[in-house]
Image (tube, grey):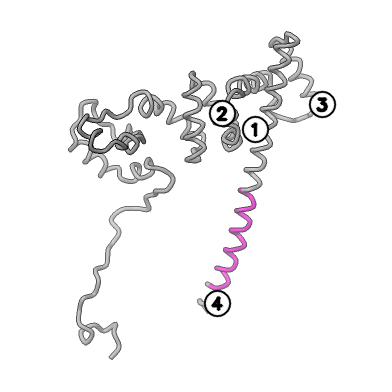
């Protein structure tokens, strides 16, 4: 009976997986449409400002107009409309970034726009967040910790000998990890780092990227049974 139940539940799980996959695709499709809409509104406002001299008061009027025509529709406040214009103006000169823009949710774009001041910094966070599928909180965390400064402006310093022996070494050290949760002093030793990583192994594995996870610690490892067949009750005579 248990075998039958397990078989049925496994079949049912497949249906649940189909539902979950469809929900994910639907959410991604909706996000693509939302970002595309915000981009086009931003473009419209950009040209209206340049050609017709629209000011913030005009954007307020537009927000009020939308509110009367689209009752209960959220996301089109004067502040958000102005951000759509900033979104377009900050990124329209970089067509190669277009596919990345539609991967991230609007809230992630707002974090990047408001806190990454330089074009190359915005591009860096857009690429990283899209590649590693960072949620909004992770985008904010990486910006707060200055990942761009660590990985791009202040890359690891390699010795001349290492560069000569391994010309590609710099590429191997290009990834930067944020280990502020270890709470190490500024002048810490390798032993301090080692001890901190052992004590915080779960968070460290998570920091390495989405391909890693920590399911727990102190899992038993069964040694291979090296007894002779006649000594092992699990082996039939």
Relative horizontal placement of residue 50, taking residue 111 as reference (left or right): right
Crowding at dot 4, Cα within 10 Å, few <14 / some 14-19 / many 20+, comes out as few
Mark positioned earlier in the residue sequence (4 or 2): 4
Q: Magenta segment range?
A: 7-24
Q: Residue furthest bottom?
A: 237
According to the picture, the residue beneath numbered tag 3 turns out to be 69
**Residue 157 at what x, y percent from top left?**
26, 28
C-alpha gap between disc 3 and disc 2: 27 Å
Q: Are marks 3 and 2 in contact (CB under 8 Å)?
A: no
Magenta span includes 17: yes
Mark 4 vs mark 2: in front: 2
Mark positioned earlier in the residue sequence (3 or 1): 1
Q: Which element type, helix, strand or loop, lies under badge 4?
A: helix
Q: Which element type, helix, strand or loop, lies under badge 1?
A: helix
Mark positioned earlier in the residue sequence (2 or 1): 1
Q: Which element type, helix, strand or loop, lies under badge 2?
A: helix
In the rendered view, tell whether residue 84 sits above or below residue 6: above
Magenta span includes 87: no
Question: Which residue is at a point 33% across and 28% down the rendered structure image?
Answer: 155
Disc sitting over residue 109 in the figure: 2
Disc sitting over residue 4 in the figure: 4
Q: Quadrant of residue 104?
A: top right
C-alpha gap between disc 3 and disc 4: 57 Å
Relative horizontal placement of residue 155, taking residue 55 as reference (left or right): left
Question: Which residue is at a point 19% across and 36% down the rendered structure image?
Answer: 190
Q: Which element type, helix, strand or loop, lies under badge 3?
A: helix
**Residue 200 at what x, y percent from top left?**
30, 42
Q: Are marks 2 and 1 in contact (CB under 8 Å)?
A: yes
Q: Quadrant of residue 225?
A: bottom left
Question: Which residue is at a point 72% across and 21% down the rendered structure image?
Answer: 44
Disc sitting over residue 35 in the figure: 1
């Amino acid at each position: 009976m248990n075998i039958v139940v397990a078989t049925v539940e496994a079949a049912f799980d497949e249906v649940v997986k189909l539902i979950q996959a469809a929900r994910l695709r639907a959410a991604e499709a909706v996000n693509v449409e939302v970002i595309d809409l915000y981009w086009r509104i931003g473009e419209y406002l950009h040209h209206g400002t340049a050609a017709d001299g629209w000011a913030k008061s005009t954007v307020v009027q537009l927000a009020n107009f939308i509110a009367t025509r689209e009752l209960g529709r959220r996301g089109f406040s004067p502040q958000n409309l102005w951000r759509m214009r900033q979104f377009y103006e900050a990124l329209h000169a970089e067509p190669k970034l277009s596919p990345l823009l539609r991967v991230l949710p609007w809230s992630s774009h707002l974090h990047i726009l408001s806190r990454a001041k330089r074009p190359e910094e915005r591009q860096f966070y857009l690429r990283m967040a899209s590649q590693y599928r960072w949620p909004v909180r992770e985008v904010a965390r990486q910006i707060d910790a200055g990942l761009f400064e660590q990985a791009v402006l202040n890359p690891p310093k390699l010795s001349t000998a290492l560069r000569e022996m391994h010309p590609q070494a710099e590429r191997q050290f290009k990834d930067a990890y944020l280990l502020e949760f270890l709470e190490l002093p500024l002048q810490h030793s390798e032993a301090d780092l080692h001890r901190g990583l052992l004590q915080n192994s779960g968070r460290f594995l998570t920091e390495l990227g989405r391909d890693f996870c920590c399911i727990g610690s102190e899992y038993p490892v069964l040694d291979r049974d090296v007894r002779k067949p006649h000594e092992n009750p699990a082996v039939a005579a």
